[in-house]
Image (cartoon, rainbow, N blue to C red):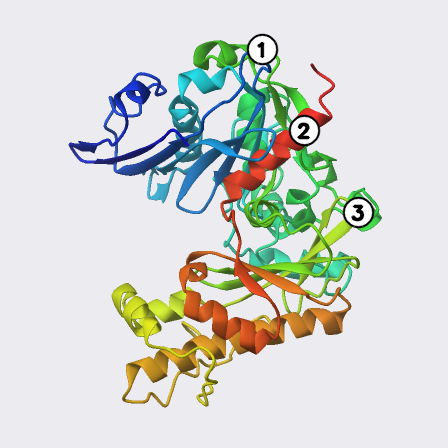
């Protein structure tokens, strides 16, 4: 790497650390515009042998819950540039104007791509939060309703969805995309304009390519799309709102070239293509490069989420378990409510770091907890009333943290065992992502409890996974 840009905008303060030669090469607007508080970090890679071979670069965007980032990689997967931004806060009445925030962030990040790199970008892809749903005008693409966010439950539509969907199907939960569509359909009643359903990633990609009504089979799963049959099922086709559903392609499939006006404005090449995306969790799994059945990724963020690459597909809405298609394999996943959220209720970040250093990870803890931030668990225990169990608390904080970390590891082990019982390929190796991946003592505890190799994934950012999808799209580009 030839250098690093680290830039933080907070009110009127601006900090930049960068060799002077690179300051001349930065993209527009990195330092000369101070907006609402945001953080931008960027790394620039060194392009070699440019006289012998024209560099082909791949741009991936990740739109998460609180901000977005991009990663640009070369044909070998080396990161050439990356940056991130927090979403600006806009209000529409009393609610957050998410659509405006996402749109502004997308084009701000395009400005953040270094000018001398833009001309080498040949394909683009975007991931977004799963089940974040936007109903748009089928002619203009403009939203007809505020977006339904990933964690929003439309329980009012659940009885109707359960009346026609198969038992325990992925859509049979209030936060599914289908429940959000049905809730909107029932609320709007007869006052319906020509409309289309898009997911967050679909709409952002549309801003770049201009072809309305296209999604990928990962995002479409929670609206009822059957990735095994590669079609919408008959029980969904028979519904009166079926015509709102987008056409479905594989993730990383070229849709169209980047809009000419966008290419001209930002300096991207005319032949740059925009490809279908995926969900943020799938992109994060792709980033870990866990490509063989039996390989898994545990994300230790606010919650504990696991993804296992399996030869067989399993679905069970009781536990929130469902399978995404990954080419000819299945990515089986579930999420527990344990994780970083309860850790932060019990300890400060400084305590977590200092106390962890004193833990002996080879020594089992005899303390038995079920750490939850509040009552309710879904996976691997399906009990909406399950109470947190974080007592008794010993006087020694090191002993207490050891017990909490080991108890979370036991929940993780039980989760992988449940996936096996439901029919998934047995886990053989676990890669770790999220904030918890930085805790080496916890990794050793988990390795002992799971009885498996556990390591930190080399790449954990979903933007990197989206860039890999863009690379895949370039390999099947019919527009060049």
Distance (Cα) linking label 3 and label 1: 33 Å
Q: Which mark is residue 425?
A: none
Mark 3 or mark 1: whose residue is earlier in sequence: 1
Label 1 sits on residue: 270
Q: Position of residue 226 (x, y in %)?
A: 78, 48
Label 3 secondary element: loop
Residue for point 60% across, 62% down: 430
> Does residue 376 appear anywhere in the picture?
no
Residue for point 62% across, 60% down: 173
Of 479 and 73, nearer the camera is: 73
Mark 1 or mark 2: whose residue is earlier in sequence: 1
Distance (Cα) linking label 2 and label 3: 17 Å
Q: Position of residue 414 (x, y in %)?
A: 61, 76
Of 68 and 18, nearer the camera is: 18
240 vs 300, left or right, is right
Distance (Cα) linking label 1 and label 2: 16 Å
Q: Quadrant of the N terminus?
A: top left
Q: Which mark is residue 473?
A: 2
Label 2 secondary element: helix
Is residue 52 shown above or below 195? above
Residue for point 44% across, 11% down: 265
Contact flag, marks 2 and 3 (Cβ < 8 Å): no
Label 3 sits on residue: 328
Q: Position of residue 377 (x, y in %)?
A: 53, 73
Find residue 56 and report its image quarter: top right
Crowding at mark 2 (Cα within 10 Å: few <14, some 14-19, many 20+): many
416 vs 405, left or right, is right
């Amino acid at each position: 790497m030839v250098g690093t840009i680290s830039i933080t905008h907070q009110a009127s303060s601006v900090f930049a650390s960068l060799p002077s030669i690179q300051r001349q090469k930065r993209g527009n607007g990195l330092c000369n515009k101070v907006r609402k508080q945001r953080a931008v970090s960027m790394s620039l890679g060194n392009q070699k042998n440019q006289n012998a071979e024209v560099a082909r670069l791949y741009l991936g965007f990740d739109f998460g819950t609180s901000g977005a980032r991009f990663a640009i990689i070369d044909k070998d997967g080396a990161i050439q540039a990356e940056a991130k931004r927090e979403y600006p806060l806009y209000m529409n009445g009393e609610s957050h104007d998410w659509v405006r925030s996402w749109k502004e962030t997308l084009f701000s990040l395009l400005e953040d791509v270094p000018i001398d790199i833009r001309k080498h970008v040949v394909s683009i892809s975007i991931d977004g939060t799963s089940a974040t749903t936007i109903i748009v005008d089928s002619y203009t693409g403009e939203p007809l309703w505020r977006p339904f966010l990933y964690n929003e439950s439309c329980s009012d539509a659940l009885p109707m969805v359960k009346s026609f969907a198969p038992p325990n199907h992925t859509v049979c939960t209030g936060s599914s995309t289908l429940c959000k569509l049905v809730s909107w359909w029932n609320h709007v009643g007869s006052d319906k304009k020509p409309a289309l359903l898009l997911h967050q990633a679909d709409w952002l990609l549309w801003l770049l390519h201009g072809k309305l009504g296209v999604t990928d089979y990962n995002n479409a799963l929670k609206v009822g799309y059957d990735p095994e049959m590669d079609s919408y099922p008959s029980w969904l086709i028979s519904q009166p709102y079926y015509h709102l559903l987008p056409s479905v392609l594989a993730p990383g499939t070229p849709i169209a070239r980047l809009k000419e006006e966008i290419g001209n404005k930002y300096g991207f090449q005319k032949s740059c293509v925009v490809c279908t995306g995926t969900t943020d969790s799938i992109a994060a799994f792709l980033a870990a490069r866990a490509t063989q059945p039996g390989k898994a990724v545990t994300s230790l963020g606010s919650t504990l989420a696991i993804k296992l690459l399996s030869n067989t597909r399993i679905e069970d809405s009781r536990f929130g378990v469902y399978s995404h298609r990954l080419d000819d394999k299945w990515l089986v996943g579930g999420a527990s409510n344990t994780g970083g959220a309860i850790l932060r209720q019990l300890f400060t970040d400084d305590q977590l770091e200092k106390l962890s250093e004193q833990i002996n990870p080879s020594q089992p803890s005899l303390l038995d907890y079920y750490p939850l931030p509040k009552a309710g668990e879904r996976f691997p225990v399906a009990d909406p009333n399950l109470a947190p169990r974080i007592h008794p608390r010993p006087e020694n904080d090191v002993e207490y943290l050891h017990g909490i970390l080991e108890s979370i590891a036991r929940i993780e082990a039980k989760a992988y065992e449940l996936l096996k019982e439901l029919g998934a390929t047995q886990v053989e190796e676990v890669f770790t992502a999220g904030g918890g991946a930085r805790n080496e003592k916890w990794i050793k505890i988990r390795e002992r409890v799971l009885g498996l190799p556990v390591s930190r994934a080399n790449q954990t950012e979903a933007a990197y996974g989206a860039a890999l999808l863009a690379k895949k799209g370039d390999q099947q580009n019919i527009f060049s």
